[in-house]
Amino acid sequence: MKFAILLHPSEIVAAVGDCGTCIQFTSYKKMVEINTTELTEDEAELYDRQIRLWGLDSQKRLRKSKILLVGIKGIGAEICKNIILAGVKSVTILDNGVVTDEDSCSQFLAPRDQIGKNRAEASLSRAQQLNPMVQVTADSEDVADKPDTFFGDFDVICATECPVEQLIRINQVCREKSIKFFCCDVFGMFGYTFTDLQIHEYAEEVTVHNIASIQDCEGPAKKIAKVDPVKVTTKRTATFVPLQDVLDVDWSSETYIKRLPKTDCSYFLMRVLLRFRSKCGHDPSPKKRQEDIKELCSIRNEVLAKLEVPVDKVPDELFSHVFAELSPACAIVGGVMAQEIIKAVSQKESPHNNMFFFNPTKNVGFVDCIGH
Amino acid sequence: MAASIAGVFEENLKSAVETAKVLVVGAGGIGCELLKNLVLSGFKDIEIIDLDTIDVSNLNRQFLFHKQHVGKSKAAVARESALTFNPNACIKAYHDSITSSEYGVSFFKRFALVMNALDNRAARNHVNRMCLAADVPLVESGTAGYDGQVELIKKGLTQCYECQPKAAQKTFPGCTIRNTPSEPIHCIVWAKHLFNQLFGEDDPDEDVSPDMADPEAAGGAGDALKVASNEKGNVERVSTRSWSQSCKYEPEKLFHKLFHDDIKYLLSMDNLWKKRRPPTPLLWGNLPDAVAGCSRNDIESVLKDQKNWSIAECAQIFADSCRNLKNQFESLKDDDHLVWDKDDKNAMDFVASCANIRAYIFGISQKTRFDVKSMAGNIIPAIATTNAIIAGVVVLHAFNILQNNLESCQTVYLRPKPTHRNQLIVPEKFLNPPNPKCYVCSPKPQVTLCVDVNSMTVKDLEEQVLKKTLNMVAPDVILDGKGTVIISSEEGETTENNLKKLEELGIVDGSVLKVDDFLQNYELSITIVQRLVPKDGPDFDVVADSSQLKPKEDKAESSGANGASDQDDDLLEVVEEQNPNFTTADSKKRKTAGETDDGISKKQKTKDVVLVVRGEI
Ligand SMILES: [Zn+2]
């Protein structure tokens, strides 16, 4: 495949991709409206090291985005930290719970002397200190009491610590209002993330080796061609499914029964833990460790039987790793989630469609596409 | 804190975390995240050391620091902030260099575990040796952009940090820089050399004027050369520095010499331009003021850094920065000189404008000041999320180590995109065993030094070979068989040897030097191979595996422009796919080893990587 390239790859209009799909080569800037508000010198200085990674345009998109964070325990605190540092426009922290002793395992935004106080409000001051250029607000109401209209003010909603019924509801609202939806949780050392960007357009840089012509500046020009690896920005589209579809997967269907042997335990462990949360009204509690392990075993049996998946897919040993929210797991899963939010907002690079799991027994973090 | 709440951890982990004494080396991007995870997990006895102070460009990720902390000690502020997460932890902060002799083997032996969160290879090498000597497990980690890596180093069980040779600093042939640049980086290197020629340390290897000895120009160009040198008299023989001083650094004159006369001279070497686009000399009074590639340029951008400058603008910036640098330079004491610093406005303006003018002359695409800064300053981009993820993995490794579960501490990679097996956080399948020929951790470490014993001095041996290349701190050197003391780490004992050539002290082809670094508890045998210094080649080669000793091209090359790198975020040997200069024979292999599929066979291959550090004096 040969085609001439002008001096700047952004001027390329279209080309045919290798596998017959039409890839549009366009300028990233032209893809979505250009934000004319420029970064200040202060912002450029503060964000220097990340602008060198994701570019000025991504930074401009970040600073326009309004984010709602539902739940601010350990993983919530990590996501909150990462997106505030990245320089979004605003973060609203919504949590009606109170700071507990258990929070000290990973919730570093709420000071230790705030036990018993509202968790969102207790986290506000430290969250704000992370970056004075971001508007941070706390909301101590219950997400269940929030009307659907409340969510319309945000570009991104990321929910943690919610019962699955609430996740499904928020996801539904996000679909109606075209809001980017994320949810994730950490249980002990284990964690998952889910992403629903509905129909998401994004730019991806690919390296193409092409013949670049060189301008001649003087004299009877000899045109000298040289082969240049150039980075071109391609526009792509990804389609997502709602969380409900992920939960409705029929593991006895032909497609999924084939996938089952290769499927890690993590998805099923997540199902067991979300069921535990809905049924018991709390996450597995260190104080009732033995009791809750028993309960987890029985819920596992019930959930997996319903899914027609062998019970040994989620071995008992896993349950010793699911208590409290442990700081290293929050850092890992919260880091991955925040980076996905940044990617989605800046419409750059391929998002993880649609689940990410961290399995601490193997130190492995992987992406899985479930429910499509 | 996880460990202090009953029922969170299993019992053995709980007590191990509560009692273990741990050391964190570095309080930067990974260090801040690490310290947070450690105190929240319930570690109570932590020491942290960092020499650095806080800079504004750290604040987008080093979240224990805020604006009011700029200029303060990283270790001290990190300690204060982390204590607010867990007021019951005991954290000792050192604002110091880990390579200082105060932190000897006995210092390291006090810890159950050491975690590196460093940003440079020299310190990593040093801590590696200290942990080997003290036999303390070390968790090494690093990030670069979206990439990251965590690795356990345990004496006798795993590879050490120096088991595999690391890519050497990339250098460019002198004639590419001086005569025939073809990429923006060539112009940037040239501009940095020019800075040093005019205001910095005078290094004859950094000449910026046309190189008449270019082998490509030879033959046929002789007449042209003669004419040119006749026309110019002996201008070429005067150093750039004295010539500039004689014309008082007047920007217009400098410009005319650098971007007109020297270019004309290059044009006269017509063999060079038979297959190349010839350069275009520029005249000060007649400079294009159109901006190249302005379609890509953000016209309304207020950030000057991000704009492409026209050549007329470049010339103006060149002139302004020249004047300012001249004043800075002249205000220094006698022999003192400026040191190029990417964060110094004038120094950076000077390099950005000169590099762009030269690029224009040679028909090379131009770069914004922002991009020139990345390349000239060798800046590794860094973000909070990558550091957070990597620090999380480090602490999971720490948990395993404290439970004596070392077999679960395989090297883990963080990838920018999922692998073909959809993994984003990718563990290797097995631990990498030590390299039996490693010149650091093998039972009898040895290397071969190829050098001209008649030209290298004892001082060069100490500074360039032992300290700079082999990363020793305070080496003692004895000539084996004769027992002559060549270098003593005791101040003043061997000063009289400094200027002697190796040969004068009886060091000849086949000699063996016994080197002992007391601080690192590291003994090394160096076998000398006599070799004349090749033209445009390094002054010496250090070869780790002598069986591989045969003349061949050094394929290892690495990051960015020459000059110290600014990896203020804990770069390990990770491959930055976005940065073509990063791909090295070696790091590619390391990357393959990261893909777990057919681990072993690929990993075996990495074992025969030879060599190699090349040095220049
Ligand atoms: Zn080794």
Image (tube, helix red, strand yellow):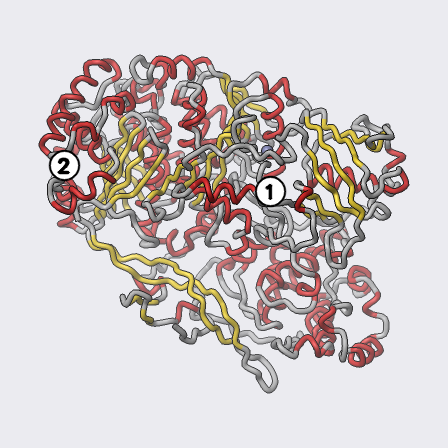
Residue B524 image position (x, y, % from top left)? 71, 32
Residue hosting label 2:
A146
Q: Residue at x 74, y 48 (%)?
A: B540
Residue B526 image position (x, y, % from top left)? 75, 36
B230 on left or right of B43: right
Query: Picture quarter containing residue B423?
Result: top left
Instruction: Please indicate, yes or no, whether residue A248 appears anywhere in the rendered image.
Output: no
Q: Residue at x 73, y 76 (%)?
A: B269
Above or below residue B89? Residue A187 is below
Query: Picture quarter containing residue B396?
Result: top left
Which label sits on residue B165?
A: 1
Ligand 1's image quarter is top right
Residue A365 image position (x, y, % from top left)? 33, 38
Q: Residue at x 49, y 28 (%)?
A: B78
Callout 2 amino acid? Lys
B504 on left or right of B200: right
Secondary structure of residue under mark 2: loop
In depth, the one of B488 and B601 nearer the eye is: B601
Residue B19 image position (x, y, % from top left)? 45, 13
Disc 2 and disc 1 in contact, CB within 8 angstroms: no
